[in-house]
Amino acid sequence: MLKINNLIVSIDGKTILNDINFIFEKGKTYAIMGPNGSGKSTLAYSLMGHPAYKISNSKSQISNDNTIVLNGEDITAMEPHARAQAGMFLSFQTPLALSGVKVYQLLQLAMHGKKDPLKIRNEAKAYAKELGISEELLNRPLNEGASGGERKKMEVLQAAVLGKSLLIFDEVDTGVDVDALKSISKFLIKYKKDKTYIVITHYNRILHYLKPDHVLVMVEGKIVKVGGPELAKTIEDEGYEAFT
Amino acid sequence: MKVTRDKQKEDLNFDYKYGFSMPEKSFYKAKKGLREDVVRMISKIKKEPDWMLEFRLKAYKIFLEKNMPKFGPSLENIDFDNIYYYLKPTENQADAWEDLPAEIKETYDRIGVPEAEKKFLAGVSAQYESEVVYESVNKELAKEGVIFCDMDTALREHEDIVKEYFGTLIPAHDNKFAALNSAVWSGGSFVYVPKGVKVKLPLQAYFRINAERFGQFERTLIIAEEGSDVHYVEGCTAPIYTSESLHAAVVEIFVKKDAHVRYTTVQNWSTNIYNLVTKRTHCGENGFMEWIDCNIGSGITMKYPSVYLHGEGARGEVLSIAFAGKGQIQDAGAKMMHFAPNTSSRIVSKSISKDGGRTSYRGLVQVSPGAKNSTVFVSCDALILDEESRSDTYPTMKIKENDVEIQHEATVEKLGDEKLFYLRSRGLNRADAESALVLGFMEPVTKKIPLEYSIELNRLIKLEMEGSVG
């Protein structure tokens, strides 16, 4: 599904991710946890192709093959939109408001005519209802006047309409109240099907719902530990001290 | 992927409908250059009354005496001797589409006049070169006493009304280009809406220049009587030529007590055209004037739609969009003059500059003594797309009354990288993401425009944006 080989990423000359190697398998749910500044969001942004994050040449002696491969396709040099078209979706940690860009319009542009506009509209409406997003918010420019929780719901709604195969949720649970967390989680479970989820989080509470197959711990730009759901529990109880 | 892109480009090429020109086939063409005999000749061909000839001749003298504007972009390349001041494409006006000459029909077909008409026209008045050649006025409108015709017809058939208003709001000595227009004007629209009549559908006119080195000097006069309501739409496209042309129009609007006029312009002259237009409204008691002014084309535009708020409680609005690409200067703005108590004005200006283009907001708000309890709102937002482009703001406020509320906002922004990344992560390529943001920036103004115009406008902007990305 998603294969990361010797990924080294720097921003403004500073190395943030140091030799990440991992294979995310199809249909599984992964949690990525780690202290602030450990590189979780950088990983998400780098996978999506943010231009500010530069992929450096590998210092690894074993292999100089530093690539990101999605569904068998090498996406390392691809622009963000091509990665999206290859099946990737990123739910942003702090979704911006886009003045004048309506939600439907964005979804239509993103679908490139592959889905009928009316169908997009009906789907979005139905998903909004499930998530408890008001119809009014759906008719406005994206996230204009929306609360933090509403913005996260809007990310999840987009994920559902766009129907990608690899979905990265960067702290979809922060700034969200208990009820919203519940509806987001239920929604994600309902539409999971054979999709791959990568859930970046600080908290165990969302993982109670999503039940990850694997939990990855990142510290200082590296994956330092991989385990099952019990790892999240350990972190919740004891913090990251054991890994640093 | 690649196939999709190429396909898109093909579609765009197909849609690029103003980059063509029809061969000229004019029945009459004045000599180049402006002399008194040219002015006399124009008036004679049109069989005008003496007072109009006098008006033209006086204006011609004023034009000779007037200096060029002392502000704004340089106009020194305008060669007044190298311009045709009158051109008449066909003998008579046609009132049915079928009667039009094939060439003109083809030109219009490509602009989409008949389609537009089918969709929601109340009446079409389309100008080809300097004469209105095609016009159909909805019968229902005529029944209610609404007059919608070209200015030349109005002078023949409604001389009394024309004489009462023509040139009273924008006299020839207002500025050099108003004087020029007054001397050689030809065509343009005349709209008269009787007391209490509300015209439900927008009245539209299409303008087009199709002769090289030919200046178009249309003259529009709109009178909205007490309690009436009308929306007039002016859309411009022009074929691309290599030598320079001049468009100097004058638009005078009278909004009477409790009346409402909205005047929408989508200006897309080709970039070799000087677009120098004087637009002004006289607004009576509780009247409401809206100028919606979108300037996408032309090489240099200088245009500052004005509202003179004479009646108590009168309201004026100017919503404008200016887009300046390579080699373009859009010097646009607004003028609001408060002469009475409880008057309010609102200016919202959105400008976009890219590839070295230059936009300027130039505005004047004046509140006279005694215009108590008036409110003024000015907001100008500039979007600059690259390092080579530029945007300037020249706001002038002359407030001579203490009891007023004034709000002024100005922002300059660049396309945010994070917003772009967000859209790109959703599957939009860079160009699509940029145009989505630019269109979003313009949205507060475009949402006020009739749908088909806003679609055309959005498409034009998209084309302009496409041009920037290899």
Image (tube, rainbow, N blue to C red):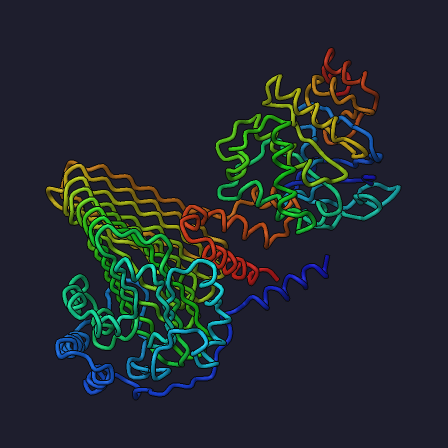
**Image height check: is B229 above or below B135?**
above
| Location of residue B15 in the rendering, given as x and y in whole percent from the top left corner | 56, 66
Q: Nearer the viewer, residue A82 or B356?
A: A82
Q: Residue at x 22, y 86 (%)?
A: B41
Q: State which quadrant residue B168 falls in.
A: bottom left
Which quadrant would the N terminus of chain B be assigned to in this image?
Answer: bottom right
**Image height check: is B322 above or below A133?**
below
Residue B291 visible within the image: no
Q: Is residue B220 left or right of residue B12?
A: left
| Location of residue A75 in the rendering, given as x and y in whole percent from the top left corner | 77, 47
Q: Is residue B181 left or right of residue A149?
A: left
**Image height check: is B72 above or below A187?**
below
Q: Residue at x 84, y 35 (%)?
A: A26
Which quadrant would the C terminus of chain B be assigned to in this image?
Answer: bottom right
Q: Is residue A65 left or right of residue B294?
A: right
Q: State which quadrant residue A161 falls in.
A: top right
| Location of residue B42 in the rendering, given as x and y in whole percent from the top left corner | 24, 83
Q: Is residue B105 left or right of residue A241?
A: left
Q: Nearer the viewer, residue B406 or B181?
A: B181
| Location of residue A147 in the rendering, given as x and y in whole percent from the top left corner | 52, 27
**Image height check: is B210 above or below A11?**
below
Residue B148 visible within the image: yes
Q: How many marks?
A: 0
The outermost residue toward the right is A62
Q: Residue at x 52, y 61 (%)?
A: B464
Q: Nearer the viewer, residue B167 or A14?
A: B167
The outermost residue toward the left is B370
